[in-house]
Image: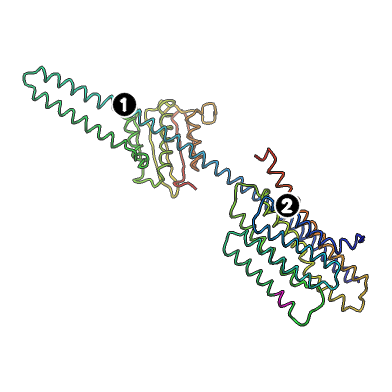
């Protein structure tokens, strides 16, 4: 009887232990799944944010392009057509109109060429064929030509990054450039893009007046946008600044995780 | 009027299965999947068999039959619950193994005349294995719906609770009964003492039935709660 009693006690204790194990497994599972679900929802939210930001970026890029188009139409084609009209008027009043008409013909041909180049650049596929390097090059050329500012660009021959991410990164660099021009009053800006394993590092250094990176009140929309976009792309943006200039380093994975 | 001891020793099992049948019937009002219907039918038949077993001696054949029915019905449940073909095949193997064992155990000439611990232990091990495979499935397929709203999870948890808690009892009960019966010190008192071990099992079964009922109420309450929208 005593032995039986001992055996039964051992079995009951063992069963009680296993019941506790079962309860532990159930609770652990609920907690773990809850945490996993939270992570999944966060990831989904991040993906949604990325898509929203991407749409915003596309709209900004389209707006920028339209502005550029307006300026080109006014400055180039408009001027060429005005010149042609003037030359035709001169030819009408002239005794030897053939030479003037030839000049008008040349001018109109140039306008047509410009128009074709513009339409080629603006066809519907441009967004899909977006190239970070080409756009950065155009941007630096444009800024260097129109302002008292020298912008240099160093980049690898190819950046193997999805188009959406390239476009987003382009807007980040554009924002950083705007900061250097508007707030930093810089006269020299250097952009260096380097591919390091699975990451792309882009640094933007200027010789502007700098700002206190620790003072949050000085972080305008530009800084916030850069940081937000870099975070959405799974990367980071870091500033170093003193009275001799500002240095921004943007580190991004080539592909979304 | 049966005494309280007789009730928890003999009638708690049919009452627990009856409760499970009632809860399954309730659940199948909104969820008409074949697996829940199969479980409802199983619980109904089992509660009748257990009721019969409470007033029959010897009742070992009835317990063996319940073991076989459990394997088949829980096998059907897991078969429909799993997404993976491999897991479904494991379920089929488990059900075939249990059926094979049942036939072997009932056809063999030398019936031991004691509770078939082996069959129930095999059932417990199988159900535990399938429960863990289900847990693996929900870990690899996280949905946006909270797990606490998933009746499958609560049902499998109740099975885990019952079969893990009863594992040692199933494993040792038949052996202890055989040992006690062959002992020169066998007495009604010692037989009743051993019976208390089965009472622990009955209580676990009853708790697991309440667990199922509570989870149905909880899910229904959560789904109706405005804060959950």
Q: Going by the picture, which residue comes out furthest to the top?
A: A93
Q: Residue at point 72% right, 62% down?
A: B42
Residue placed most toward the observer, A160 or A242: A160
Per the image, is A224 magenta?
no
Q: Position of residue A150 (x, y in %)?
A: 34, 30
Q: Position of residue A178 (x, y in %)?
A: 41, 29
Query: Which labelled disc corresponds to residue A71?
Result: 1
Chain containing the residue with disc 2? B
- Side of A215 where B55 appears, left or right: right
Residue interval drawn in magenta? B101-105
Give the quadrant of residue A9.
bottom right
- Side of B150 where A155 appears, left or right: left
Chain containing the residue with disc 1? A
Say above or below: A162 vs A60: below
Q: How many marks on residues?
A: 2
- Side of A130 where B112 appears, left or right: right
In the rendered image, the quadrant that contains the N terminus of chain A is: bottom right
Q: Going by the picture, which residue comes out furthest to the left?
A: A95
How far apart, in angstroms, are the residues tagged by discs 1 and 2? Answer: 72 Å
Q: Position of residue B201 (x, y in %)?
A: 81, 63
- Side of B99 where A247 appears, left or right: left
Query: Which labelled disc corresponds to residue B26?
Result: 2
Q: Nearer the viewer, mark 1 or mark 2?
A: 2
- Name the element at disc 1: helix
Badges 1 and 2: C-beta atoms under 8 Å apart?
no
């Amino acid at each position: 009887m005593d032995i039986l009693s001992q055996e039964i006690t051992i079995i009951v204790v063992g069963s009680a232990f296993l019941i506790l194990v079962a309860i532990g497994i159930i609770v652990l599972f609920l907690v773990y799944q809850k945490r996993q679900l939270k992570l999944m929802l966060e990831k989904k939210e991040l993906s949604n944010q990325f898509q929203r930001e991407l749409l915003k970026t596309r709209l900004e890029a389209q707006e920028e392009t339209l502005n550029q188009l307006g300026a080109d139409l006014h400055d180039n084609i408009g001027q060429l057509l005005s010149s042609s009209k003037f030359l035709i008027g001169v030819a009408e009043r002239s005794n030897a109109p053939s030479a003037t008409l030839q000049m008008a013909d040349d001018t109109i041909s140039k306008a047509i060429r410009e128009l074709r180049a513009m339409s080629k650049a603006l066809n519907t596929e441009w967004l899909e064929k977006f190239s970070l390097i080409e756009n950065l090059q155009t941007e630096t050329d444009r800024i260097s030509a129109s302002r008292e500012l020298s912008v240099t660009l160093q980049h690898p021959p190819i950046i193997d990054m999805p188009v959406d991410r390239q476009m987003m990164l382009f807007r980040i660099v554009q924002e950083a450039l705007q900061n250097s021009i508007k707030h930093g009053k810089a006269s020299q800006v250097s952009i260096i893009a380097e591919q390091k394993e699975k990451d792309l590092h882009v640094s933007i250094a200027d010789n502007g007046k700098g700002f206190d990176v620790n003072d949050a009140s000085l972080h305008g929309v530009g800084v916030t946008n850069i940081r937000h976009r870099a975070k959405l792309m799974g990367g980071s943006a870091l500033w170093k600044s003193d009275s001799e200039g500002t240095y921004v380093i943007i580190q991004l994975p080539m592909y979304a995780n | 009027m049966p005494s309280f001891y007789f009730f928890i020793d003999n009638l708690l099992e049919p009452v627990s299965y009856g409760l499970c049948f009632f809860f399954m019937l309730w659940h199948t009002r909104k969820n008409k999947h074949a697996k829940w219907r199969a479980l409802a039918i199983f619980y109904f038949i089992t509660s009748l068999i257990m009721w019969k077993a409470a007033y029959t001696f010897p009742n070992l054949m009835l317990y063996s039959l319940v073991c076989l029915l459990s394997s088949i019905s829980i096998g059907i449940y897991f078969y429909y619950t799993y997404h993976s073909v491999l897991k479904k095949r494991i379920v089929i193997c488990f059900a075939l193994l249990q059926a094979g064992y049942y036939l072997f155990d009932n056809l063999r000439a030398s019936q031991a005349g004691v509770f078939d611990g082996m069959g129930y232990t095999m059932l417990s091990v199988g159900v535990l294995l399938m429960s863990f495979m289900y847990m693996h499935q929900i870990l690899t397929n996280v949905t946006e719906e909270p797990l606490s709203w998933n009746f499958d999870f609560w049902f499998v948890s109740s099975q885990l609770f019952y079969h893990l808690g009863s594992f040692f009892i199933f494993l040792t009960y038949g052996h202890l009964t055989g040992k006690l019966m062959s002992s020169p010190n066998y007495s009604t008192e010692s037989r009743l003492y051993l019976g208390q071990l089965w009472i622990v099992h009955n209580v676990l079964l009853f708790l697991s039935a309440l667990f199922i009922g509570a989870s149905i109420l909880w899910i229904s309450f959560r789904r109706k709660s405005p804060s959950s929208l």
